[in-house]
Amino acid sequence: MIRADAFPPDVWESICTPMHLILPGDPSGSGRGALYLGSWTAAVDNDLLARHRVNAIVECHDAPWGACDSHSSSSEDLIVNGSMTPTLARSSTSTSQPMSSIRPPLSRSASSSLVPSYSNHSNGSNASGIQQAKFGRFKVAIADSAAPDVLAPHLDDAVRFIRDRLTKGENVLVHCQQGISRSPAIVTAFLMREQSIPYEAALHLVKSRRKCVKPNAGFEKTLRSWK
């Protein structure tokens, strides 16, 4: 169990916030979509996704099911490590309350990248009546393990998926269970590749948006040597 007193207040607040904006979209210029980083809580909150017009999701975990299953009625086929698989059937009655219900009050210095949670709606529309779009979905089937060669085989395909969706003007959420290690590693890799910056600079950017980010030692080693 994660203990609140084990973290500084700003880090704990970040853990309890479902998702953060990493790169804003540019609808008036290139038409590029926005990139979000978050936890499982964000991925199953239909209203939150609709409010921020997220229509592409990258999920990073090794479970046989995924948060995207809750969107099965309005989702495209799931791409698992570059291969298409049928959408898994699951009820769309999931809730985002476990994390949002324990979220502490926001500090006055809260970053503008912070995206709070909203109640879940399973009828395909958000609280404002915005109809949800289809979800383009990509699963990175990895454990949060520091073992060698866990992350590297997935980076090129994941980065390509994110780039392609953003280029189409779609908003993308990259998530894992807590948004601390696996999904930040993927987002960091994306920034390294797309902005041609070293690991330290990419990680600094990600951590400046979501302060709880901490890729495990194995992921860090992989990213430092990744080209």
Image (cartoon, grey):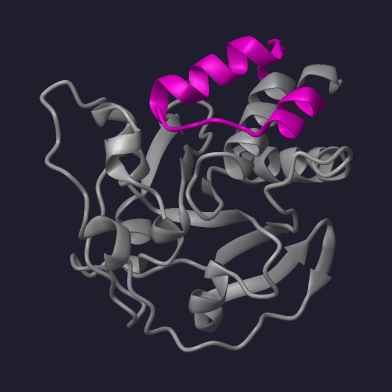
Question: Could you say where residue 138 lies in the image, as x and y percent from the top left?
Answer: 69, 58
Q: Is 139 a magenta residue?
A: no
215 versus 153 height, above or below:
above
- What is the magenta range? 195-223
* Residue appearing at x 42%, y 55% in the figure: 1
Question: Could you say where residue 80 lies in the image, as x and y percent from the top left?
Answer: 78, 63
143 versus 67 height, above or below:
above
Q: Quadrant of residue 101?
A: bottom left
Question: Could you say where residue 97 lies in the image, as x and y percent from the top left?
Answer: 27, 66
6 versus 140 height, above or below:
above
Query: Is 141 left or right of 225, judged from the image as shown?
Result: left
* Residue appearing at x 25%, y 57% in the figure: 100
Q: Nearer the viewer, residue 213 or 82?
A: 213
Q: Is residue 97 visible?
A: yes
* Residue appearing at x 42%, y 67% in the figure: 44
Question: Could you say where residue 169 lies in the image, as x and y percent from the top left?
Answer: 54, 42
Query: Is 177 left or right of 89, judged from the image as shown?
Result: left
Q: Quadrant of residue 196?
A: top right
Query: Is 199 left or right of 99, judged from the image as shown?
Result: right
40 versus 111 height, above or below:
below
Q: Nearer the viewer, residue 69 or 53?
A: 69
Q: Nearer the viewer, residue 72 or 168?
A: 72
In the picture, which quadrant includes the C terminus? top right
Q: Nearer the viewer, residue 155 or 123?
A: 155
Q: Main secondary structure of the magenta part?
A: helix
Q: Is residue 27 visible?
A: no
Q: Is 214 a magenta residue?
A: yes
